[in-house]
Amino acid sequence: MRRRFRLKEEQVAGLLFVSPFIVGFLIFSAGPYIASLYLSLTTYDVLNPPNFVGLQNYIDLASDETFGKALYNTLYFVVFHGPTAIAMALILALLLNAKVRGVSIWRTIYYLPQVTPAVALGVLWLRILSPNNGLLNSILAGVGIQGPAWTVDADWVKPSLILIRVFVVGTWMITFLAALQDVPQELYEAASIDGANAWQRFRNVTLPMISRVIFFAVIAITIFSMNVFDIAYFMFPPQVFGGQLGPQDSALFYMVYLFQQAFSYFHMGYAAALAWILFAITLAITLIQLRLSRYFVYAETSK
Amino acid sequence: MTTAAKGERRQKAFERSTAFLEGRGLFWVAQRALIYGALVFFAIVFVFPFVWLLSNSLKDPLHIFDANLIPQPIVWQNYVTIFQETETMGTPLISMIRNSVIVSVLGVTAVLISSSMIGFALAKLRFPGANVVFFLVLMTMMLPGEVTIVPVYLIWRKLADLTGGLIGTGTLFPLWLGGLFGSSFYIFMLRQFFLGIPQELIEGARVDGASYLRIYWQIMLPLVRPALLAVAVLEFQAKWNDFMGPLIYVSNKPDLWTLPIGLFQLNQHFGFGQFRYELIFAAAVLMLLPSVILFFLAQKQFIKGLSAGAVKG
Amino acid sequence: MDTGTGEKNRTLTRRELVRRSALFGGAVVVAPIIAACQPGATPGASTSPGASGSTAAQKVTIRVWGYGLDDARAKARLNVFKAANPNIDVQPVGGTLNTQQLLTAVASGDPPEVINTDRTQVGSWAGRSAIDPITDLIDKDKFDMSQFYPATVEQVKYKGQTYGVPHFATIDLFWINNKVLSDAGTDPASVDPGNWDQLQSLGEKLAKVSGGKVTRTGFDTKMQDGRLYYWTWANGGDLFSSDGSKAQFTDAKAVEALTWARDAVKKQGGEKARAAFSQTQDFFSPNNPFLIGQTAMTIFEQWLLGVLADPGPNFAFTVLPPRKRNSKDPLTTVTGGAFAIPKGVKADKRLAAWEFIKGMVSTDAWIAGQKATFMDKQSKNQKYTPTITGNIKADQEDMNTVYKSIGPSYDAAIKTWQTALNAGKYPYSGPVAQQISDLVTANVNDALQEAKQPADALKKLNDDAQKAIDDYAKGPGNK
């Protein structure tokens, strides 16, 4: 009798506690999502009533070359940005975890790019990457390498963006550092006694112990990168190369194309369809990653 | 001196000379040198944008972007001019800072309370529909919000009509009020954190007659303080730097401009062709300082907040 | 340099756009949303105070978007208007006119009373019923549209109705750096903008290229920045049928023009090298590339004068109106902004909005603005160069009275404006203007960068442009 009463109170409490989310979801998510799903089946310019066209927008996508280009650019970014960003964050975290002096200063320094306004970063990077007189190509020339035309050559635009992004990893660095500090010290001691060298300790102790965190980062960075938006405008606003984002649309990312369709061309219906396709692709990738995770993520037995 | 003593001394000398082979020896020294070398290398690369920004914020228009990292001459005046210029623009910098602080503080508070409540319930309470709610949380994380901008705007517009302009478009509310309904990412993160707290704590408190609200407020929240701090740091940065929100909701209300939108307008204020980068940069430095200071002060807790939290899955 | 803060956003140099856009990474996010950006002008004086008589009793408040009070000109113009219309309270909102914001405001029935938009966007707004025609207001007051340059008046029309009032104008001119040409043994006076063979060979001769790097551009056709229109017109062709319903990018004249421009840049090191070189330049600085001889000859807008005036008052250069090919006849591109009244503005406010527009573009207001700008410049020890307001009388007053000679090159340059303005044409400004403009630059650059043959790029451009027009014809919002 008592137990039933308690359960009931727990249920009520639970529902009350999550009620803000439910209210918010119903007002600011569900309605707009349903609206956007419906709009994806229409042609709509905001100012005039939507015109139902069935699946036409989705059918048009199949023959839209720019859509293909945008998707390719985005996947390219996802594939190369994810690993480089994670590697950089991990390297920094490992360095900071090596019992160094002044750790809070180092941490703050590495965190700086994360909070530096893009206003500065954009201007700065254009100067650094300028093909003829930029700092990077000057350094490369110093060691006898002729640097590429980073900001001008269509083949080098995406690598440029990936390079820029590799420095904005403060949050992940901190996340990895937190995970590293959680690895029980005894495991390292045990490994040392077994004669494991530094690399073996990293490979067999550190990596498995933080594999969950890395995996979390992989999924989150993938989702964020699929939605990459500002970075392209950051350096290659469409006015610079006319309607192109970067030479030959090399920096036209999916989300940018979506925005262009919605707010430059007034194709709200088409943009809505683009959004749902992006959602489907992101979901598919995430599910595959989740499926693969069991091969890579070390399962902690208990805590 | 006995041979024994001699032998001992020799032994000690030998040990001294080979000390580098173990413990804090040469290998250790080399390793440390390598580590510090790497730290310094990365520090230079990572701090460069900031130093460059700071440096150019102290230059005069003729020397902006020149090769000197230490400005010649140093123009501290830029940091005064920025206040004067925003005054002539009609929206003083102080007013922008005030708006940014309002939005950030209210936004962080709102999101902390709601997301922790929701996360707590999802992690610790059994109630009908919990799985559905959790699924919806995950879903909203993945769906791009961009296409809902127009419907959401219309909702705020409607709210403005209903409340006679008190809430809704043309006020600061749309910039932070959404936080009251929780944010998926933080809900997810805090839920993971709450999962790590033993269920027995709740059971025990229940036996002592504590209400769920009290358990949440007095027992749970203190335990997840680091995670709350992590959320606060992340959300503060998000709100402090938010450009899209103010652009849509308050850009035609100059007295409600926040820093990012205000600085964007300032950029245009100088008129065509006059970019006054040094002033924009000075404002940018002022804008990034709170984030840096907050991080510097909160970093230890921040790390703790992440270590036991969401990321452990 | 205050060169009339009107409508030049669309026509900035690439370099400048890079700088401007890189400002505020976050801000830049909105670039696509801000289709028509007009930092801008200011309120002005009503020449017909009596017209506001109908609303004389009550105070009416109007909101003006895309129009700030940032400079002396803006303030002076508003003051003139205020003095004549004490019953109209103006709330100007500066910065850029945000397309997204305007869309939602109009859709939700609460639009601003006046917008200051790019003229190329007028057809887009009109075609989607975001702005109302003002023909009735013009007729009511017998408002004289011929006080503006013909091309600017044509551009604010859509389907026979007038939707806006011209506000600022920007024209392309042909610029020659005298010293660079003389040093190369060419008399600057011998350059003929209508002689394409001469331009191409001079471009090659004047260019400096070594080791794949350009250190001087001989002749910049500006084809990469949307000048396909001008070069095709100059060549005797057109990119659209006269009613704007048919794309004609495959016109042999267009193909010839693009091929010629591609070859011109190819002979000067290629488009990639040109772009890389342009990224080393600081346009708005004493090191302006034209001023310091990094660009020998170029097509560029008239406001370049304002950039040159302070750092180079003694600079010797030649400015010519661009011409038709193999002809002495002038021909140029005219762009600019317009005031318009959104749909859904209530009747009394609409009248007040109309008074505002008339007041702002009146000769009195413009002249007050010019004088105020002159004083402002003088107080800062800066040179004053005239602006093209769109109001013919005000512009003549500006050039003849307000402007004080900076040097012979400057005086001569300003004298060419009138000729060019009378020979102005404007790019496609129909309902899918933004899309067409994006398509033009994208495909033209594909050709310039030699990713495609000019004919192929224009074929693709033609197909896509025609599709955009046809899709719109099926219904707004149709893709």
Image (tube, coloured by chain):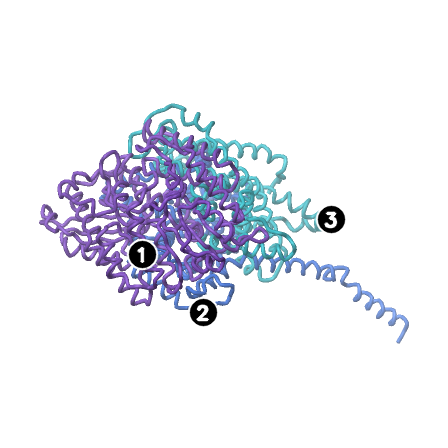
Q: Is residue C13 visible?
A: yes
Q: x and y percent of residue B16 in the render?
A: 79, 66
Q: Which mark is residue B74?
A: 2
**Chain A pictured colour:** cyan
Q: Which residue is mark 3?
A: A196
Q: x and y percent of residue A172 in the render?
A: 54, 48
Q: Nearer the viewer, mark 1 or mark 2?
A: 1
Q: x and y percent of residue C202 in the render?
A: 48, 51
In this view, the residue in front, C428 or A17, is: C428
Q: Residue furthest right?
A: B3
Q: What is the chain identity of the residue bearing mark 1?
A: C
- What's the residue type where badge 3 is placed? Ala
Side (left or right) of C86 relative to A80: left
In this view, the residue in front, C461 or C264, is: C264
Q: What is the chain identity of the residue bearing mark 2?
A: B
Kind of element beneath mark 1: helix
- What's the residue type where badge 1 is placed? Ile
- What's the residue type where badge 2 is placed? Ile
**Chain C pictured colour:** purple
**Chain B pictured colour:** blue
Q: x and y percent of residue A245 in the render?
A: 46, 42
Q: Nearer the viewer, mark 2 or mark 3?
A: 2
| Both labels 1 and 3 in a single chain | no
Q: Which residue is mark 1?
A: C414
